[in-house]
Image: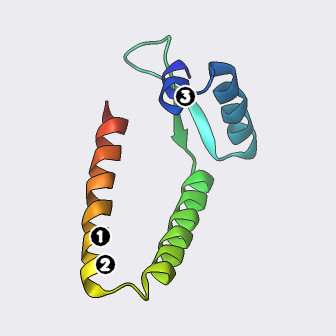
Amino acid sequence: MNEMAKQLHVKAPSITTAVDELVEKGYVRRVQSKEDRRVVEMELTTKGEAIMKRAHEKVIKELAKKLEHVESKEYTAVHAAMVTLRKALQTSIDQ
C-alpha cells in the first residue's frame, strides 16, 4: 500500500480505504507476496478485469471520435506521442 500511495502521491490510509472498497465490491483481491510475507499485492478479479476492459473500450471509442477530424499528418504526430507516453508510463509502472 505504501508503494502505491507513493506512486499516486497520496497518503497510505487513502489507498487502504480505496482498496478496501474495491475488495468489497469484488473488483480486486489481496494476495500475500510469495517473496516477502510482509508485502500484500493486489490483483484484479474476473469482475475487475471485465470493468477494466469496458472502461478501456469506452476510452478508445471516445478518443477515436475526438480524432475523427484530425488531419492525417497531425494524427500521425498524436499517435507517435501516445506511443511514447505509453512507453514512459509502462517504464514508470515497472520500476
Q: Amino acid at mark 1?
A: His
Residue 89's disc number: none
At 54% from the left and 28% from the top, the residue drawn is: 9
Mark 1–mark 3 Cα distance, whole angstroms, equals 28 Å
Q: Are marks 3 and 2 in contact (CB under 8 Å)?
A: no
Answer left or right for 8 relative to 47.
left
Position of residue 4 relative to residue 85, above or below, is above
Which marked residue is nearer to the observer: mark 3 or mark 2? 2
Local crowd at mark 2 within 10 Å, few (<14), some, or many (≥20)? some
Which percent across, then down, holds residue 27? 64, 47
> What is the CA distance from the residue labelled 3 to the residue labelled 2?
32 Å
Tell me the element at label 1.
helix
Q: Quadrant of the C terminus?
A: top left
On the image, the x and y values in percent for residue 6 come to 50, 23
Residue 22 image position (x, y, % from top left)? 69, 41
Local packing at callout 3 (Cα closer than 10 Å; few below 14, some 14-19, many 20+) is few
| 27 to 39, vertically: above or below | below
> Label 1 near label 2: C-beta < 8 Å?
yes
Q: Amino acid at mark 2?
A: Tyr
Secondary structure of the residue carrying tag 2 is helix
Using the image, tell me which numbered label, if any, was put on residue 79.
Answer: 1
Gap in angstroms between the C-alphas marked 2 and 1: 6 Å
Q: Amino acid at mark 3?
A: His
Say if 71 sits above or below 50 in the image. Answer: below
Residue 88: which quarter of the image?
Answer: top left
- Label disc, if present, on residue 9 of the rendered structure: 3
Circle 2 sits on which residue? Answer: 75
Q: Who is closer to the viewer here, 93 or 67?
A: 67
